[in-house]
Image: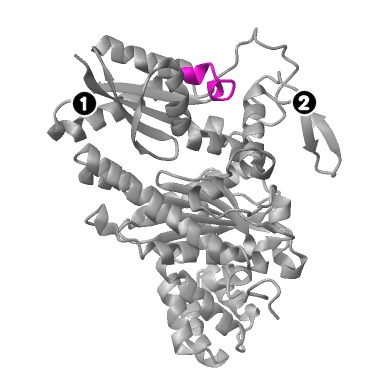
Amino acid sequence: MMNPYYLRIEGVNFDSFVLDTDRIKIVRGGSLMLLNSVDWLEQNIKRQHITLDKISSGASFGLFRFEANSDGEASQVAAQARETFNYDKRYKHATLTIAVQPVGEPEAYQHTRSRLEAISRWQQMQSPSVAMPDPNEDEVKGVCEFDRVRPATGFPVALIRDNGDEEEALISTACHARWVEDGKENRPWVTDKDGFYKKHTGIDGLKFTTDLHALAQGTDYGNLHNKMAVIYLDGNHFGKKALAYCTSEKKQEDFDKTLREEFQDGTLTTLLTEIKGNSDWKNGGNIRLETLLWGGDEIIWVVPAWKGWWMLGRFFEISREWNYHKISDEPLTHGAGLVFCHHNAPIQPILSLARNLGDLAKGDRSANRVAYQVLESFDHAGADLEEMRAKRWPLGDAATMILDGDAMLAANEAAWAIKQTDLAKRQLYRLAALAQSGDLKSAEEKSGKLREVAGIEESDLGKLENCFNPGLSTWLHLLELWDYLGLKEKQKEEGQP
């Protein structure tokens, strides 16, 4: 008699497979590989005459249902799934956990799902963080120039050095697999494969910049030329909300379809529809957008510095319209990290900083919150992010460093209006200098008079305070973000006068 079982797969150790290099092509390729891993397994395991019915999937997570005669046969299906990944020339470099459990009674669904997740966590703790290649498989030619960890055994690839010269670089098979995968996904017009954006939005014919220099290049944008914004978004307690809502397979499927397809893919579709014809987003015919992580409850975007604030603010605006009651009794909110930096800053620490900032923003999980950092030159946050931020922030209340994400777009409009007044940036520098000296009383007194002296509308100041927190905090944030806020689009649509 055949019995039902669940099989759960999850890609883990992102830092060692996706975020282990500063080469954006390889980061992007690794992320796309894990995003595609669930559908890939479902298709490829059919060759072993095994049928997996997908219930749920995320960025690198999948839950399937299948039938087997016994626990032993179910374990063999799990082993076959593992071999399917391990024998593939790409996925053998990733670390994936695979767990199996009997389906059990319908009312035990939540308990069974928790057991599967616990097995996955246990496997992750027992697994090496890096999947190393067989030392006898290929001739070792040196150290991979891209991750500086694995042996270089594959064919060399072209690498652009800092001086602009193109030279051959030694690459590991793991990095090379991701390099090739990125080419397939981001150049769909030369393959038979639909690209990432078409899969998730249905919008065809779009082309995107393929490196960060092209993304950030913009001599028309003054000192924002060659600068970018890195955006990290993480859902607040999405896992707990899924566990509370998903008391059955049907509810799990509904949750997954609503969150992934209706909410997240729908938001991406709206964003792409709005930016695809906007010249501020274009470099030639290519859209200046990188999606480095997508799915689950995490997103990483890289956009031009002059669009970072708008992109994050617009995401929050769209996500507020999600009908969360379909899958949760509480609103679906996010914590976000936002980093403004030079385009050739090492991407690994920048991504790590953005994620850490996102964690800091999660103090209030009932609302959309943002923590940001402006990095000049190759400045970095150091080992202790909170300590570094506290030293740079003269106010005693660390909570005033966290911004209201829902007020970002209104603050952007207000900042533009304020820049048209008599407010001079040097006045903000004087306030900041007073605050840094410890004379907060004098700084507060001066800031209280600044609106009237500069001729700033009270309503505009109120919009800033809603985002930046009232009082001196607003002026300090305005100074820090001066170059990135209040930017008017030069041309809404291509060809528009």
* Magenta stretch: helix, strand or loop mostly: helix
Is residue 152 shown above or below 76?
Answer: below
Residue 156 numbered mark, or none: 2
Percent position (x, y) of residue 85? 49, 21
Work out which quarter of the rendered image holds the C terminus and state it.
Answer: bottom right
| The magenta segment | 84-93
On the rendered structure, is 469 left or right of 381?
A: left
Work out which quarter of the rendered image holds the N terminus and state it.
Answer: top left
| Residue at 31% over, 23% down | 119
Residue 88 visible in the shown view: yes
Residue 469 visible in the shown view: no
User: Is 87 colored magenta in this rendering?
Assistant: yes
Q: Front-most of 138 and 118?
A: 138
Percent position (x, y) of residue 439? 50, 73
Q: Front-most of 336 and 136?
A: 136
On the rendered structure, is 258 left or right of 358?
A: left
Q: CA distance from mark 2 to mark 1?
A: 48 Å
Say which element carries label 1: loop
Q: Residues within 10 Å of mark 2 (few under 14, many from 20)?
A: some
Percent position (x, y) of residue 81? 42, 19
Tag 2: amino acid: Pro
Instruction: State how many labels appear.
Output: 2
Tag 1: amino acid: Val
Say which element carries label 2: loop
Q: If you read the primary sequence from the N terminus, does the residue marked by circle 2 or circle 1 appear first?
A: 1
Give the residue pinned by disc 1.
Answer: 103
Percent position (x, y) of residue 92? 54, 20
User: Is 350 colored magenta in this rendering?
Assistant: no
